[in-house]
Image (cartoon, coloured by chain):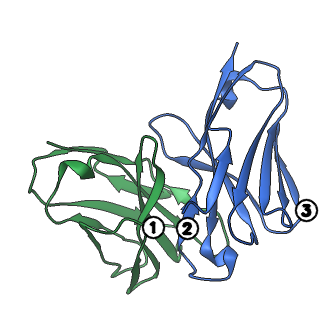
Chain colours: A blue, B green
Protein backbone atom coordinates (compact mmCIF):
# COMPACT_ATOMS: atom_id res chain seq x y z
CA UNK A 1 0.00 0.00 0.00
CA UNK A 2 1.16 3.48 -0.78
CA UNK A 3 2.47 5.18 2.34
CA UNK A 4 2.49 8.66 0.86
CA UNK A 5 -0.40 9.83 -1.30
CA UNK A 6 -0.09 13.05 -3.26
CA UNK A 7 -2.87 15.16 -4.69
CA UNK A 8 -3.52 16.30 -7.24
CA UNK A 9 -1.65 14.05 -9.69
CA UNK A 10 -1.31 16.93 -12.10
CA UNK A 11 -1.99 20.62 -12.09
CA UNK A 12 -2.12 23.24 -14.82
CA UNK A 13 -2.13 26.85 -13.68
CA UNK A 14 -1.83 30.24 -15.30
CA UNK A 15 1.37 32.13 -14.55
CA UNK A 16 0.90 34.31 -11.50
CA UNK A 17 -1.66 32.06 -9.83
CA UNK A 18 -1.20 30.39 -6.47
CA UNK A 19 -1.42 26.64 -6.01
CA UNK A 20 -1.26 23.95 -3.34
CA UNK A 21 -0.05 20.35 -3.48
CA UNK A 22 -0.88 17.93 -0.69
CA UNK A 23 0.91 14.87 0.66
CA UNK A 24 -0.87 12.54 3.07
CA UNK A 25 0.80 9.74 5.00
CA UNK A 26 -0.85 6.46 5.99
CA UNK A 27 1.39 6.38 9.07
CA UNK A 28 2.18 8.83 11.81
CA UNK A 29 4.45 11.39 10.26
CA UNK A 30 7.45 12.66 12.20
CA UNK A 31 8.86 14.57 9.27
CA UNK A 32 8.77 14.96 5.54
CA UNK A 33 10.90 16.08 2.60
CA UNK A 34 9.82 17.91 -0.52
CA UNK A 35 11.66 17.49 -3.81
CA UNK A 36 11.34 18.91 -7.30
CA UNK A 37 12.21 17.04 -10.48
CA UNK A 38 12.52 18.45 -13.95
CA UNK A 39 11.80 16.06 -16.79
CA UNK A 40 14.69 13.67 -17.40
CA UNK A 41 16.69 14.90 -14.42
CA UNK A 42 17.31 13.86 -10.85
CA UNK A 43 15.41 15.12 -7.84
CA UNK A 44 16.38 18.37 -6.20
CA UNK A 45 15.88 18.67 -2.45
CA UNK A 46 13.66 21.64 -1.59
CA UNK A 47 13.11 21.46 2.14
CA UNK A 48 12.60 19.23 5.13
CA UNK A 49 9.92 19.55 7.79
CA UNK A 50 10.52 17.89 11.12
CA UNK A 51 8.00 19.15 13.61
CA UNK A 52 4.25 19.34 13.65
CA UNK A 53 3.18 22.80 12.63
CA UNK A 54 6.59 23.60 11.17
CA UNK A 55 6.52 25.84 8.14
CA UNK A 56 9.44 26.56 5.82
CA UNK A 57 9.86 28.72 2.77
CA UNK A 58 12.22 28.59 -0.17
CA UNK A 59 11.82 31.52 -2.54
CA UNK A 60 8.09 31.50 -3.36
CA UNK A 61 7.51 27.95 -2.17
CA UNK A 62 6.17 27.33 1.34
CA UNK A 63 5.63 23.95 2.93
CA UNK A 64 3.91 23.09 6.16
CA UNK A 65 3.66 19.91 8.19
CA UNK A 66 0.40 19.14 9.95
CA UNK A 67 1.45 16.24 12.12
CA UNK A 68 -1.98 15.55 13.56
CA UNK A 69 -3.49 15.18 10.12
CA UNK A 70 -0.49 13.20 8.87
CA UNK A 71 -0.34 15.67 6.02
CA UNK A 72 1.95 18.20 4.46
CA UNK A 73 1.08 20.91 1.99
CA UNK A 74 3.31 22.73 -0.45
CA UNK A 75 2.12 26.13 -1.58
CA UNK A 76 3.50 28.15 -4.47
CA UNK A 77 2.71 31.83 -4.56
CA UNK A 78 2.54 33.73 -7.87
CA UNK A 79 3.65 30.75 -9.94
CA UNK A 80 6.20 31.19 -12.72
CA UNK A 81 7.20 28.94 -15.64
CA UNK A 82 10.37 28.10 -13.68
CA UNK A 83 8.17 26.36 -11.09
CA UNK A 84 7.05 23.79 -13.63
CA UNK A 85 8.12 20.22 -12.94
CA UNK A 86 7.25 17.26 -10.78
CA UNK A 87 6.97 17.77 -7.05
CA UNK A 88 7.46 14.75 -4.82
CA UNK A 89 7.09 14.31 -1.10
CA UNK A 90 9.28 11.77 0.62
CA UNK A 91 10.02 10.35 4.02
CA UNK A 92 12.83 8.31 5.44
CA UNK A 93 11.69 5.54 7.72
CA UNK A 94 13.95 7.06 10.34
CA UNK A 95 11.34 9.77 10.44
CA UNK A 96 8.83 7.08 11.38
CA UNK A 97 11.28 5.90 14.04
CA UNK A 98 11.74 2.55 12.29
CA UNK A 99 13.95 1.01 9.58
CA UNK A 100 16.36 3.90 9.30
CA UNK A 101 17.50 4.47 5.74
CA UNK A 102 14.42 3.00 4.08
CA UNK A 103 12.83 5.82 2.17
CA UNK A 104 9.49 6.17 0.49
CA UNK A 105 8.08 8.72 -1.93
CA UNK A 106 4.74 9.87 -3.18
CA UNK A 107 3.96 9.38 -6.86
CA UNK A 108 4.50 13.06 -7.58
CA UNK A 109 2.44 15.99 -8.79
CA UNK A 110 3.17 17.30 -12.27
CA UNK A 111 2.89 21.06 -12.40
CA UNK A 112 2.49 22.96 -15.66
CA UNK A 113 2.58 26.75 -15.58
CA UNK A 114 1.10 28.45 -18.63
CA UNK A 115 2.65 31.81 -19.55
CA UNK B 1 32.28 18.77 -4.43
CA UNK B 2 30.81 16.35 -6.98
CA UNK B 3 27.82 15.16 -4.90
CA UNK B 4 26.37 11.90 -6.21
CA UNK B 5 27.86 10.61 -9.46
CA UNK B 6 26.12 7.95 -11.50
CA UNK B 7 27.54 6.17 -14.50
CA UNK B 8 26.66 5.46 -17.21
CA UNK B 9 23.96 8.00 -18.14
CA UNK B 10 22.50 5.79 -20.86
CA UNK B 11 22.74 2.06 -21.50
CA UNK B 12 21.14 -0.44 -23.85
CA UNK B 13 21.33 -4.11 -22.89
CA UNK B 14 20.20 -7.30 -24.50
CA UNK B 15 17.99 -9.64 -22.52
CA UNK B 16 20.12 -11.88 -20.34
CA UNK B 17 23.15 -9.60 -20.21
CA UNK B 18 24.51 -8.44 -16.89
CA UNK B 19 25.86 -5.05 -15.95
CA UNK B 20 26.70 -2.81 -13.03
CA UNK B 21 25.40 0.70 -12.51
CA UNK B 22 27.94 2.74 -10.60
CA UNK B 23 27.16 5.24 -7.86
CA UNK B 24 29.67 7.26 -5.87
CA UNK B 25 29.27 10.09 -3.37
CA UNK B 26 31.93 12.29 -1.81
CA UNK B 27 29.90 13.77 1.04
CA UNK B 28 30.59 11.05 3.61
CA UNK B 29 26.88 10.24 3.73
CA UNK B 30 25.83 7.20 5.75
CA UNK B 31 22.71 6.36 3.75
CA UNK B 32 22.69 5.36 0.11
CA UNK B 33 19.77 4.10 -1.95
CA UNK B 34 18.87 2.91 -5.41
CA UNK B 35 15.50 3.69 -6.98
CA UNK B 36 13.82 3.03 -10.25
CA UNK B 37 11.36 5.47 -11.74
CA UNK B 38 8.71 4.30 -14.18
CA UNK B 39 5.77 6.20 -15.66
CA UNK B 40 2.73 5.88 -13.42
CA UNK B 41 4.70 3.97 -10.78
CA UNK B 42 6.55 6.77 -9.07
CA UNK B 43 9.92 6.29 -7.45
CA UNK B 44 10.40 2.80 -6.04
CA UNK B 45 13.16 1.75 -3.68
CA UNK B 46 15.27 -1.19 -4.90
CA UNK B 47 17.98 -1.55 -2.22
CA UNK B 48 19.39 0.70 0.42
CA UNK B 49 22.32 0.88 2.81
CA UNK B 50 22.77 2.61 6.15
CA UNK B 51 26.53 2.23 6.18
CA UNK B 52 29.51 0.34 4.78
CA UNK B 53 28.91 -3.39 4.95
CA UNK B 54 25.17 -3.03 5.56
CA UNK B 55 22.54 -3.39 2.85
CA UNK B 56 18.86 -4.20 2.84
CA UNK B 57 16.07 -4.77 0.38
CA UNK B 58 13.60 -2.15 -0.63
CA UNK B 59 10.27 -2.46 -2.37
CA UNK B 60 11.44 -4.05 -5.66
CA UNK B 61 14.74 -5.92 -5.06
CA UNK B 62 14.28 -8.94 -7.35
CA UNK B 63 16.82 -9.15 -10.15
CA UNK B 64 19.21 -6.70 -8.51
CA UNK B 65 22.18 -7.05 -6.18
CA UNK B 66 24.08 -4.43 -4.24
CA UNK B 67 27.11 -4.23 -2.03
CA UNK B 68 28.60 -1.45 0.08
CA UNK B 69 32.26 -2.13 0.70
CA UNK B 70 33.08 1.55 1.22
CA UNK B 71 31.13 4.58 2.42
CA UNK B 72 31.56 6.24 -0.98
CA UNK B 73 30.42 3.53 -3.42
CA UNK B 74 27.15 1.69 -3.84
CA UNK B 75 27.02 -0.24 -7.15
CA UNK B 76 23.83 -1.85 -8.42
CA UNK B 77 24.19 -5.10 -10.34
CA UNK B 78 21.68 -6.46 -12.81
CA UNK B 79 22.30 -10.18 -12.90
CA UNK B 80 20.36 -11.13 -16.04
CA UNK B 81 18.64 -8.16 -17.64
CA UNK B 82 14.97 -8.42 -18.54
CA UNK B 83 12.77 -6.00 -20.54
CA UNK B 84 10.85 -5.31 -17.31
CA UNK B 85 14.01 -3.67 -15.98
CA UNK B 86 13.83 -0.94 -18.60
CA UNK B 87 13.62 2.16 -16.46
CA UNK B 88 15.39 5.24 -15.19
CA UNK B 89 17.58 4.43 -12.20
CA UNK B 90 18.52 6.94 -9.53
CA UNK B 91 21.08 6.67 -6.79
CA UNK B 92 20.84 8.93 -3.76
CA UNK B 93 22.67 9.53 -0.51
CA UNK B 94 21.92 11.27 2.78
CA UNK B 95 23.05 11.87 6.30
CA UNK B 96 20.60 10.43 8.81
CA UNK B 97 17.71 12.79 9.33
CA UNK B 98 18.52 14.89 6.28
CA UNK B 99 17.16 15.09 2.74
CA UNK B 100 18.59 12.90 0.03
CA UNK B 101 20.96 14.13 -2.66
CA UNK B 102 20.19 12.45 -5.97
CA UNK B 103 22.37 11.55 -8.89
CA UNK B 104 21.35 12.57 -12.39
CA UNK B 105 20.08 9.10 -13.28
CA UNK B 106 20.83 6.23 -15.64
CA UNK B 107 18.40 5.55 -18.44
CA UNK B 108 18.44 1.81 -19.10
CA UNK B 109 16.77 0.04 -22.00
CA UNK B 110 16.65 -3.75 -22.18
CA UNK B 111 15.79 -5.16 -25.59
How far apart are the two marked residues, 1 and 3, measured between alpha carbons?
A: 29 Å
Q: Position of residue A13 (x, y in %)?
A: 73, 22
Pointer 1 with pointer 2, Cβ within 8 A:
yes
Residue at 67%, 27% (x, y): give it. Answer: A82
Residue closer to the observer: A84 or B6: A84
Q: Secondary structure at mark 1?
A: strand
- Left-right relation of B11 to A5: left
Identify the subunit bearing mark 2.
A
Residue at 75%, 67% (x, y): give it. Answer: A31
Badge 3 is on which residue?
A53
Badge 2 is on which residue?
A103
As drawn, the residue found furthest toward the right would be A53
Identify the subunit bearing mark 3.
A
Badge 1 is on which residue?
B33
- Respond whether the residues carrying marks 1 and 2 are from the same subunit: no
Residue at 41%, 80% (x, y): give it. Answer: B56
How far apart are the two marked residues, 1 and 2, measured between alpha carbons?
A: 8 Å
Q: Secondary structure at mark 2?
A: strand
As drawn, the residue found furthest toward the top would be A115
Identify the subunit bearing mark 1.
B
Q: Earlier in the sequence, mark 2 or mark 3?
A: 3
Q: Is residue A59 visible?
A: no
Q: Position of residue B82 (x, y in %)?
A: 17, 53
- Respond whether the residues carrying marks 2 and 3 are from the same subunit: yes
Residue A70 occupies quadrant: bottom right
Amino acid sequence: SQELEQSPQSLIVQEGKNLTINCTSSKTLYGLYWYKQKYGEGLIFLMMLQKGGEEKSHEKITAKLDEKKQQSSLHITASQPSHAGIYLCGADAALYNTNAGKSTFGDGTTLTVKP
Amino acid sequence: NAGVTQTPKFQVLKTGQSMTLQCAQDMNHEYMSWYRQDPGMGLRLIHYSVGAGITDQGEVPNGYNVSRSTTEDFPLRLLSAAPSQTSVYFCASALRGNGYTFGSGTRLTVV
